[in-house]
Image (cartoon, grey):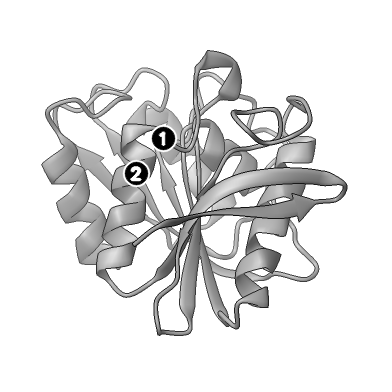
């Protein structure tokens, strides 16, 4: 069962929901753009969290700074990247040794820039990285990126545009395109579940 938790990113207290399993593997899940209503309660974020949990991962979804009960203000991705590292450090403090990172939309954009000194994410999953909406030009190699998922009708994360970035990010990445899905995956949650579950 998930429980409400708080942890610190620098001086800021952030809120989240965690479910601690007995295994040594855990995942941090990040949410869509806070200026457009994104938070940890997002349906896709919740689905991603549930899938990882079903595979025995301890999970942590949280609100970025300035969202919901998390302190601070929107920081254009820089502070949010620090929040991701803080979330990873929080899981490590719970004796979780193998960390993964999963992000949806804006969360995937933030995760792409994350470089943590004290919490190394061994694998990363991106769901609908918003390449047509956010600037990914600063992102070079993402060695731990393993899977990218998007919809064939996703105008914010168009498959053809994502393909252009993959050779730079990580040529060995698996790209899964869900036929008929748009950015919000309405009526395609089952397909998203199946794709992600088969990877994990």
- Front residue (pair 162, 106): 106
> Left or right: where does residue 165 sit relative to residue 57?
right
Residue picked out by circle 2: 46
Decide: marks 1, 2 in contact (CB < 8 A)? yes
> What kind of element bears circle 1?
loop
Number of numbered discs on residues: 2
> Left or right: where does residue 20 sit relative to residue 113?
left
Q: Position of residue 178 (x, y in %)?
A: 19, 38
Q: What's the residue at 27%, 58% (across, down)?
A: 51
Q: Position of residue 168 (x, y in %)?
A: 58, 49
Q: What's the residue at 75%, 34% (across, down)?
A: 71
Instruction: Name the disc covering residue 41, or none.
Output: 1
Which of the 4 image quadrants contains residue 189? top left
Which of the 4 image quadrants contains residue 67? top right
Q: What's the residue at 58%, 82% (across, down)?
A: 97
Say above or below: 135 vs 193.
above
- Front residue (pair 121, 15): 15
> Left or right: where does residue 65 sit relative to residue 181?
right
> What kind of element bears circle 2?
helix
Which of the 4 image quadrants contains residue 157? top left
Q: Position of residue 69 (x, y in %)?
A: 63, 33
Give the position of the N terminus as an image quadrant: bottom left
The residues tagged by marks 1 and 2 sit, at their Cα atoms, a distance apart of: 6 Å
Specify few, some or many for label 1: CA neighbours under 10 Å numbering under 14, 14-19, or 20 or more.
some
Say above or below: 199 vs 135.
below
> Left or right: where does residue 179 sit relative to residue 20?
left
Give the position of the C terminus as an image quadrant: bottom left
- Front residue (pair 35, 132): 35
Q: Position of residue 185 (x, y in %)?
A: 24, 29
Q: Earlier in the sequence, mark 1 or mark 2?
A: 1
Q: What's the residue at 36%, 53% (across, down)?
A: 49
Say above or below: 126 vs 186.
below
């Amino acid at each position: 069962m998930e429980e409400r938790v708080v942890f610190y990113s620098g001086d800021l207290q952030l809120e989240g929901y965690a479910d601690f399993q007995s295994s040594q593997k855990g995942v941090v899940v990040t949410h869509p753009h806070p200026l457009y209503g994104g938070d940890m309660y997002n349906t896709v974020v919740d689905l991603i969290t549930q899938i990882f949990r079903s595979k025995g991962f301890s999970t942590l979804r949280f609100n970025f700074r300035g969202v919901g009960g998390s302190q601070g203000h929107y920081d254009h991705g820089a502070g949010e990247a620090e929040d991701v590292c803080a979330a990873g450090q929080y899981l490590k403090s719970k004796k979780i040794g193998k960390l993964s990172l999963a992000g949806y939309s804006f969360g995937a954009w933030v995760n792409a820039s994350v470089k943590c000194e004290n919490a190394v994410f061994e694998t990363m999953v991106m769901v609908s990285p918003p390449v047509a909406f956010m600037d990914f030009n600063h992102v070079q190699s993402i060695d731990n990126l393993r899977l990218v998922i998007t919809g064939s009708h996703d105008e914010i994360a168009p498959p053809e545009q994502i393909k252009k970035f993959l050779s730079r990010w990580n040529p060995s990445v698996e790209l899964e395109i869900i036929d008929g899905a748009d950015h919000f995956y309405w009526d395609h949650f089952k397909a998203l579940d199946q794709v992600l579950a088969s990877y994990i």
